[in-house]
Structure formats: structure tokens, C-alpha cells
Image: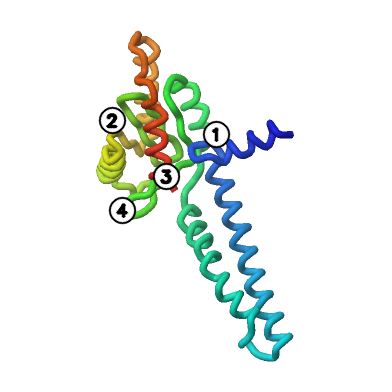
Amino acid sequence: MRKEAETKIKSLQKGSKGYLAKRKKQAAVIVAFFAVLILALIIVGILLNGSNKNLLTLIAIVLVLPGAKFAVNLIVISPHKPVSEELFKEVETNARSLTRLYDNVIGTTERPVGAPAIAYCDNALCIYTDEEKTNVDFLTKQVKNFLQGDSIFINVSVYNDEKQFVKRIANLNSNIESSTKKPIEGRDEKIRASLETMLI
């Protein structure tokens, strides 16, 4: 039982396949809970006191703020799609030696951007977005500058063409597997920690 619980917790971590769907479901349930609770408090307060000037209504008003926070979160992540099963299999097959992150929503200074798949190694980071309106150059600069803020200097590439993305990560994977150079200790974890800060 404990092992199953740990697996479930791990699956909710940013970068895990299925993370986005679970985040949406959780946010929707919490928003619905707050909506029902607030409405119930207002109705009960009016029925018991004959007016809306009562303690229960005050509690309901206080609960609006945390409820709104979850509602905003749901609105932000709802438009973005999770990684497709086909792309997931492609990445897992072609980027075995790279760190892979799935179901990502990247926060930028303009708007959140969905990135179904990200793969990286010590010196290169590749991002795939399936959102046509995404300014690739802008997103590349945003991610690069963010990582540099954490003293991580890495080549960042953003793709809106799935085939080009898979081709690039396959080449990186091939280079890593044929190289005798050892990865820099702790760099993978540092890159991931910085990326997760940028992910919503």
C-alpha cells in the first residue's frame, strides 16, 4: 500500500506523464467544492437569520479568495493539452539517455505556453510546443534567460514541428550514447529544479 501511495504522489510531480490531466481534475474538484460550500453557507445563513448579515455569510465571503485562486489556476491550465501517446512513445524510444519532462505549461511574461514534451542533457534543452500562436523565438529567449538567472548556461531550442523535435532529441541521444564524456555531476538535477520553477 505504501509503495502504491508513493507511486501516486510521484506521478503528480511536474514533468510526469498524466500530470496535466490530474492537475485539471484536482482544480475542478476543488473549485466545485468551494462553490458548493460558499453557496450552502449563504443559503443556511439567510434561512437561520432572515438576512444576509450574519456570520455564515461573512465566512462565505472569506472563502471566495482561496476558491478564486483555484479557479484562476484551472482557467490557466485548461487550454493546454497533455502529451499524446504517440509522441510519448517517440520520445521515450529516441531520448533514452536524456531527461524527459511531459505535460508542461511554461510561464512567460506574456502568457502560459503548453509544452507537451521537453528533453535535455548537460548542454542542450529541447522544447516541443503544439500551440500554433507561440512565438518560438520569444519562448526560447524567455527560457534561456530564466535558466541563466539560475547560472545555467545551456543551448535552448523550441520546436513547433513534432518531427523536427524528435529528430533533434534522437541526434542528441545518439551523441550522448557514443560519447565517453561523463555528465557533469548534479547538473541534471539543477536544470530540472530551475525548469520546475518556471513550469505552472
Residue 50, percent from left and from top: 69, 91
- Residue where numbered disc 2 is placed: 154
Q: Is residue 23 above or below residue 122?
A: below
Query: Given the image, on which type of amino acid does mark 2 rest?
Result: Ile
The image quadrant where one finds the N terminus is top right
Left or right for 187, reference 140: right
Q: Residue at x 48, y 61 (%)?
A: 72
Q: Tag 2 or tag 1, which sits nearer the N-term?
A: 1
Amino acid at circle 4: Thr
- Residue type at mark 3 is Leu
- Looking at the image, is mark 1 or mark 4 nearer the viewer? 4
Dot 4: element: loop
Tell me how far mark 1 sits from mark 2, CA to CA.
28 Å
At 47% across and 49% down in the image, what residue appears?
Answer: 80
> Residue 166: horizontal and vertical position, in percent?
40, 27
Q: Residues within 10 Å of mark 1 (few under 14, many from 20)?
A: few
Amino acid under label 1?
Answer: Glu
Residue 109 is labelled as 4
Q: Which residue is mark 3?
A: 199
Q: CA distance from mark 2 to mark 3?
A: 18 Å
Q: Residue furthest bottom?
A: 50
Separation of residues labelled 3 and 1 (CA atoms): 21 Å
